[in-house]
Amino acid sequence: MSILGLDISKNTFHATVFHHNKSYRRTFGKQPKGFAELHRWLSKKAVACGHACMEATGIYWEQVAHVLHELGWTVSVITPLRIKAFAQTDLARNKTDRYDSWLIARFCQEKRPAAWGPPSPTQRKLQALSRHLEALEQTLQQQRNRLEACVDETVQQSLQEIITQLEHHITKIKQQIQGHIDDTPELKRDQDLLCSITGIGPKTAQKIMAEVPTMTTYPNARKVAAHAGVTPKHVQSGTSIHGKPKLSKIGNARLRKALYVPAISAIQHNPIIKDFANRLRQNGKTEMCIIGAVMRTLLHLSYGVLKHNQPFDPNFLHNA
């Protein structure tokens, strides 16, 4: 099988191909012209569709991944931390784009990472709108902070105008998000299922749907929790080092941020999670540890209601 390793930056991407015990390297522009050149180059080398691998660096990888997937390649998108760890095991002394593409190809060849599946066009639109809303809300908070600290009337007036415009755009984007969900039966169904979980409201449901659009394709809920970085990280060595467990935080930071407040709400109002949190307190767990465990539980419940297409039932265990 042909192996393609890609190191992607803002304007270019570097490719390394392993094919019939030979390796080839080349740099391409990231515009559609670069994708066409990549396709011609692979065809010239008689490289059939194989396994392509790239890092999840910002948003730069997405367009390349979709193009290769449409061409019939098996595509894997991996966290840069895995490549960094792989380079350390290889005692790598260099850090260049050309070398990184070769290293990614080697990683793909040896580790055979799981295949990536593209979200549907409706899911991609929801993700784009959700992330745009998040960016606008962050900018709004920045401008409000500046206004609070500002003493010049002219600057205050300018900031207030900016804030008013941002508030208008945020309201409009929120309406577009809900309208898009209402117009898409599968998204509307998923939102209703997620909102059946006490502690998860429409905004959190939208964020979960946007950040894990292919949740039901995961083999189990633990994989979803790992994707969000809410799995526990244990520190233990010998008999003297016993660190406190904490969140691994190796995963989607947007999803972790979106789950924090709902976890606090669920501890107060969701009977199953409230009992779970009380058991953890009795076992001596700290509040932050409990919140992390509840964030993970909310994802487990989310996976369950979506996977089985059934709303949350707080009496499920009692009825069983």
Image (cartoon, rainbow, N blue to C red):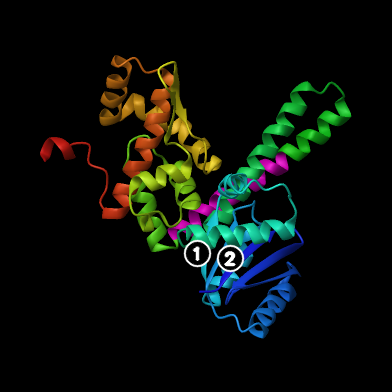
State the residue in front, 229 or 177: 229
Q: Amino acid at mark 1?
A: Pro
Determine which residue is flagged by label 1: 118
Label 2 CA crowd tier, 10 Å (few <14, some 14–19, many 20+) = many
Q: Quadrant of the C terminus?
A: top left
Which label is found at residue 127? Answer: none
| Residues in magenta, as a range | 164-182
**Are the two marked residues, 2 and 1, in contact with CB atoms closer than 8 angstroms?**
yes
- Marks 2 and 1, the one that precedes in the sequence: 2
Label 1 CA crowd tier, 10 Å (few <14, some 14–19, many 20+) = some
- Residue 309 is at least partly visible in this image: no
Determine which residue is flagged by label 2: 65
**Picture quadrant of residue 128:** bottom right
Left or right relative to 52: residue 275: left
Residue at the spot 59% in from the left edge and 53% down from the top edge: 56
**Picture quadrant of residue 214:** bottom left
Of all residues, the one furthest to the left in this rendering is 320
